[in-house]
Amino acid sequence: MDDHALLPVHPVPADLERRCDPYPWLNRLRTEGPVQRIRLRDGTEAYMVTRHGDVLAAAGDPRLSSDPRRLTSQPERSVRLSAGNALPSMLTTDAPDHTRLRRLVSRAFTARRVEALRPRVREIAAGLLDAIVPRGHADLVAEFAFPLPVAVICELLGVPFADRAYFSRQSSDLLRPPVDAAEMARAEAARDRLRDYLADLVADKRADRGDDLISELVAATEEQRLTDQELNSMALLLLVAGHETTVNLIGTAMWLLLQRPEQLAALRADPALLPAAVEEFLRYDGPVMTGVARYTTTDVEIAGITIPADQIVILSTGAANRDPERFERPDEVRFDRADNPHVAFGHGSHFCLGAALARVEAVEGIGALLRRLPGLTAATDPAELPWRPSVLRGLQRLPVTFDTPATDAG
Ligand code: HEM
């Protein structure tokens, strides 16, 4: 008897990431059981792992592949491959390719290298705030949470910041939920445009090397350590990841604080709390909320349920991060958690390469906002604000008001 045949199939709601509070759905699935059958928005059926301990174990289990090319069943394979994964990157490969690809760039993202970037992150944040402070109102997403990480990743990669309107549009189209054929086609077209844009940029750097990561990778292709196609996929992955994640973390963190004035005041009074607060924002409502994808290469038993070979498995970071067996009072934002082993950055060999960078950007960014914007208040009801139509979770905008320096003086 197939265990999985007994389980009901839960369709992932089309608007899950756009809900003001998507966690009741994830919490319900976890309460119903550690492994659930779900229907993804591209129509394919999958399994969802919901508990913290099982997500940790599954993320380190080599029988669960990160490579959708390992799927042999149709149409799952073609759907997964069309969904932006057609060309391999480190995110969608297993060892040994994954190890080789990750090693080529991991030095640029170590805690030490990222720490050296902290003053530059501070400087970019200060420059953005110089333009905002005198006005008394701002959209914290468009004017701060977005340009801060984008400026940083552009400098690291050697991508012109001036092109951001173009590649940001492609990047957000690429990540729209694949709810129908039109959305999938839109995502594929965006991916192709990004690939063309990056291929042109690589050609320029081949002719005229700069002091940046893409130029370093161009050198690696010349030494045959990386193919041209892998270079293109790597640049695309880093540009998109650098774009679509920290912006959401800073936006959501500020949205949560504006609804919790006492906690906002506590952070402002004691910035030493910021690193723990950022970990709590990641746990409570992180950008990668639904989960990360894996593919079974053989039958795999998780929490007593056998998932057959050749299946898609979503390790739900959002459900795991609210698991009451691991986190006391998981549905509360608390800066005083003694230990906070959230899985917002994943776990195992694919653990987020940009985690140290995202942490520095969030601590510096949120710290600067609290320091320089006294009297910070939401300009519209936070419950009414729109969330982005994306597979990642983030606010579309966050209008706020604050005291201007002139008001302070008066
Ligand atoms: C708050 C911000 C971020 C969150 C929540 C986040 C989350 C994640 C998660 C959950 C994974 C694991 C994927 C998996 O296991 O399949 C991951 C991988 C990755 N992230 Fe992040 N990320 C963030 C920021 C960044 C930034 C700023 C960068 C780059 C500049 C980045 C680059 C990557 C890369 C390259 C991988 C693939 C690593 C691998 O497959 O070995 N991330 N991220």
Image (cartoon, rainbow, N blue to C red):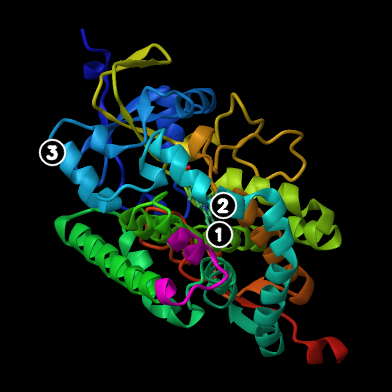
Can you name the residue that lies furthest to the top here? 1
In the image, is residue 211 part of the stretch drawn in magenta? yes
Whole-Å distance between the Cαs marked 3 and 2? Answer: 33 Å
Left or right, 103 with reference to 76 = right
**Local crowd size for mark 3, using a 10 Å CA cut-off: few (<14), some (14–19), many (≥20):** few
What segment is highlighted magenta in the picture? 205-219
Q: Measured along the vertical axis of the image, is residue 330 above or below residue 104?
A: above
- Where residue 104 sits in the image (x, y, percent)? 50, 49
- Residue 124 falls in image quadrant: bottom right
- Residue 393 falls in image quadrant: bottom left
Residue closer to the observer: 347 or 146: 347
N-term mark: 3 or 1:
3
Which residue is disc 3 drawn over? 75
- Where residue 325 sits in the image (x, y, percent)? 59, 24
Which residue is disc 1 drawn over? 246
Q: Residue at x 68, y 36 (%)?
A: 340
Whole-Å distance between the Cαs marked 3 and 1? Answer: 33 Å
N-term mark: 1 or 2:
1
Q: Measured along the vertical axis of the image, is residue 190 above or below residue 109?
A: below
- Where residue 324 sits in the image (x, y, percent)? 58, 28
Beta carbon at label 1 within 8 Å of ligand 1: yes
Residue closer to the observer: 249 or 72: 72
Tag 1–tag 2 contact (CB < 8 Å)? yes
Beta carbon at label 2 within 8 Å of ligand 1: yes
